Amino acid sequence: MNKSNQQQSLVIIKPDGVQRSLIGEIVKRYERVGLKLLAMKMVIPTIQQARQHYSSDPQWVVKKGQSIIEKFKAQGKTTSLTDQQLGQNILDTLIKYITSGPVVVMVWQGTNAIKLIRKITGGTEPLTSDVGTIRGDYTLDSYQNADMDNRSVRNLVHASGSPEEAQTEIALWFKPEEILKYRLIAEQILYDINLDGILE
């Protein structure tokens, strides 16, 4: 079995996903493709946890603010706010959103898990997410609606964006002993080079 490109990813079913009873549907999407669930728990995030989660990259606030300014420029709009202020506003809305109720936090593992999970999850904005993705199929929110209400986009799921991000996020939400090591029978079909042991 070749495990050289095995990755782990953190996935959070956000409060809107929990409240809309979509936990099973979301978990099923990741299971069906062959990913392995290593850890899972339901929690109500504290403000401190949420702040740490979204601030794992110290430049996140500024980068997010800069991307908003670029978006404004492309639309021919201007703003008097700095990139720091715009980014901080987004951080505040994200923290308010994820701490508003229970979430389901999970660790998934598999070949190229990061990219695969993000493909299944869909783009950040549900309105423009592809049909067949979690966000494209199960919700209808948009940046425009979120901006009008000065809130975060309700997009059901958070998924790690890189192996480094996943490592930091997993350590924030789980103790090492909470992440199980076990073998799934399906892994033999997915990863075994010669499919040895199928025939009796």
Image: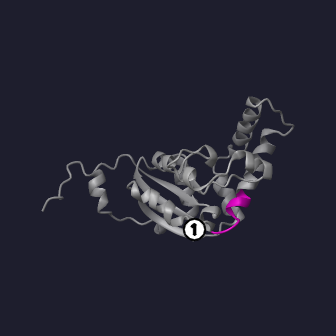
Q: Nearer the viewer, residue 96 or 140?
A: 140
Q: Which of 33 and 126 is in front in this view?
A: 126
* Horizontal relation, residue 176 to residue 54: left or right: left
Q: Quarter of the image containing the C terminus? A: bottom left
Let me know if residue 171 appears in the view.
Answer: yes
Scheme of colours in the image: one colour
**Side (left or right) of 122 relative to 76:** left
Q: Would you identify the image quadrant in which residue 74 lies?
A: top right
| Secondary structure state at the residue bearing disc 1 | loop
- With 14 as the anchor, is 144 left or right in this view? right
Residue found at the far right of this picture: 80
Q: Residue at x 65, y 69 (%)?
A: 44
Is residue 96 on the magenta stretch? yes
Q: Where is residue 148 in the image (x, y as percent from the top left)?
A: 79, 49
Q: Which residue is drawn at 70% across and 59% down?
A: 97
Residue 61: within the magenta?
Answer: no
The x, y position of residue 189, in whole percent, is 27, 55
Report the magenta residues as a range: 95-103
- Residue farthest to the left, as pictured: 200
Q: In this view, does 44 lie above or below 81?
A: below
Q: Amino acid under label 1?
A: Ser
| In front of the other: 31 or 5 | 31
* Disc 1 target residue: 21
Residue shown at the point (45%, 47%) measured from the top left: 116
Residue drawn at the location 18% of the way across and 58% of the way down? 198
